[in-house]
Image: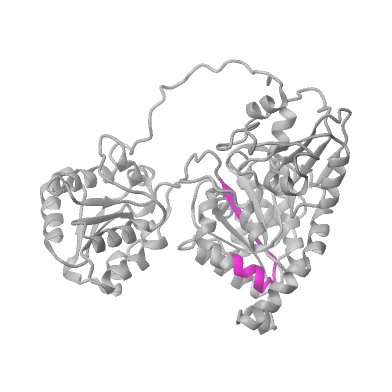
Amino acid sequence: MDTKTLFLGDEAVAQGAMDAGISGVYAYPGTPSTEIMEYVQAAPEAGARGVHRQWSANEKTAMEEALGMSYAGKRALVCMKHVGLNVAADAFINSAITGVNGGLVVVAADDPSMHSSQNEQDSRFYGKFAAVPVCEPCSQQEAYDMVRAAFDFSEKIRLPVLLRITTRLAHSRADVVPAPARAENPLNPSSDPRQWVLLPAHARRNWAALLARMPEITALGDAFPWNRFIPGTNRQMGILAAGIAFNYLNECFPGGTCPFPILKLGQYPLSSARLATLQAACDSLLILEDGAPFIEEQLVGLFPNPVMPIRGRLDGTLPRTGELTPENVAAALGRARPEGPAVPPLVTPRPPALCRGCPHSDTYAFLKEVMSDFPAGRVFSDIGCYTLGALPPYEAIHSCVDMGASITMAKGASDAGVRPAIAVIGDSTFAHSGITGLLDAVAESSPVKLLILDNEITGMTGGQESLAFGRLESIAAGIGVDPAHIRVVTPLAKHHAENVRILREEIAWPGVSVIIARRACIQMRRKG
């Protein structure tokens, strides 16, 4: 098969996984990883094969479900954004101790510069922490090829493999030449309980065995073609370019060749032999990587500055925060990046805002009116479209930290004496990580008022189905909320007075209240 297809980076990962013979993909929507699952969901071949492709409640459940499929001998893909790996960390770290049966690849889509995230953490640290291989493609073609090879590698070394991409690769397009598809694995559940039962005695043995294999795993991974040394004619400086940084480096030499020796990296752990080759070919090093100074920090320890000067993010040659870009790579090289034609402004820049007609606007209207009577009260919000309630004209919320933190922060504030302590959370985020926080509040009869903004979809990431759809009242009642204090309101201007009254009544109640503000997302209505 040599037909080129124009793919997003996310789509290249998805197609590569399907062609690698996956039997399931597990994910929770989060930019910039969402399109991986959506591509598989829409793929006729995935439907014909019966590939599992339904959204999970959160990243932890996705990781554990994929691990279960691996236990059964089949190949599974797990997809999430970088902060989702925090949620999945318990299962992810322990999967390195259990090892795998069927191939297991975990895709973490990092977001340097925080285009749609609350931090810009680098998932490569998780791979190093867990002692599992990490792959980092520089192009859509490499993303496709790497994910296919990662499944083979996973089964060869009996470990999960982490595939790390960043926003620019995930959401840019390039031609990809697919390879022939591989058949799915047969059902073959693991027969070794000592591998999967992490009693301390088993876990200690497995961890020691994993550490003992690291030199072998490093050597096997380094044999892949995306780690390679490119000689140069100018030994004044050597360049180590990881992932998409290799593309940015090439953009600085249009129509020409970089004169400096280059070590192109797409596979970790780092190979000391390749690093030594680069060190021998130059007098100083420039480290190009998108994200944290992950490689740079390790090299400073290996090559102390008096012996081998190292430049990068740590010494200020490149910015310490934000994305790596062709512009700051060019600046680090002391070159002017060639400029393309000027692009005239097409629209006037504006801050993000809720859509016109969004139900959250009417919810914030009655919430703000009520809270104006309680200047000492606080509203703790969560991750979703409704986070925009922090901006004008609403200015209705006081916090947004991580998925599910609205309820638990409201409970902690109420424990400290804040009255009223109100939590604002979306229906999908409630299913993701809000249920356990509500259980804490119910167990202590905390005077927390939970306002669930039920727009019946996962709105912020493109309209995926919410696993809480049609279940919110029964979930709240099942956890133990008094049914008399589970109230459903319709956020519309004509119901404003009624909604104000209901919220005031629940604030007066000394126990846990759940108010569900239910109206479909305006974007979903337009599509319907």
Q: Is residue 262 left or right of residue 297?
A: right
503 versus 319 height, above or below: below
The coloring applied to the image is: one colour
Q: Position of residue 159 (x, y in %)?
A: 70, 67
505 left or right of 467 in image: left
Residue 446: x %, y % from top left: 23, 67
* Position in image of residue 405 (x %, y %): 37, 57
Residue shown at 20% from the left, 72% from the top: 482
439 falls in the magenta region:
no
| Residue 45 occupies quadrant | bottom right
The answer to whether any part of residue 104 appears in the image is: yes
Reply yes or no: does residue 100 show up in magenta: yes
- The residue lying toward the viewer, choosing from 237 and 190, is 237
Query: Residue 103 versus residue 14: which sits nearer the camera?
Result: 103
Residue 231 versus residue 201: which sits nearer the camera? 201
Q: Is 250 placed above or below 515 here?
A: above
Image quadrant where residue 341 sits: top right
Highlighted range, magenta: 93-110
- Residue at left 59%, top 49%? 122
Residue appearing at x 76%, y 23% in the figure:
254
In this rendering, is residue 274 above or below 404?
above
Q: Residue at x 69, y 55 (%)?
A: 134
Question: Is residue 477 among what the camera can see?
Answer: no
Q: How many marks?
A: 0
Residues 494 and 180: in front is: 494
Q: Could you tell me residue 233's position as x and y percent? A: 89, 28
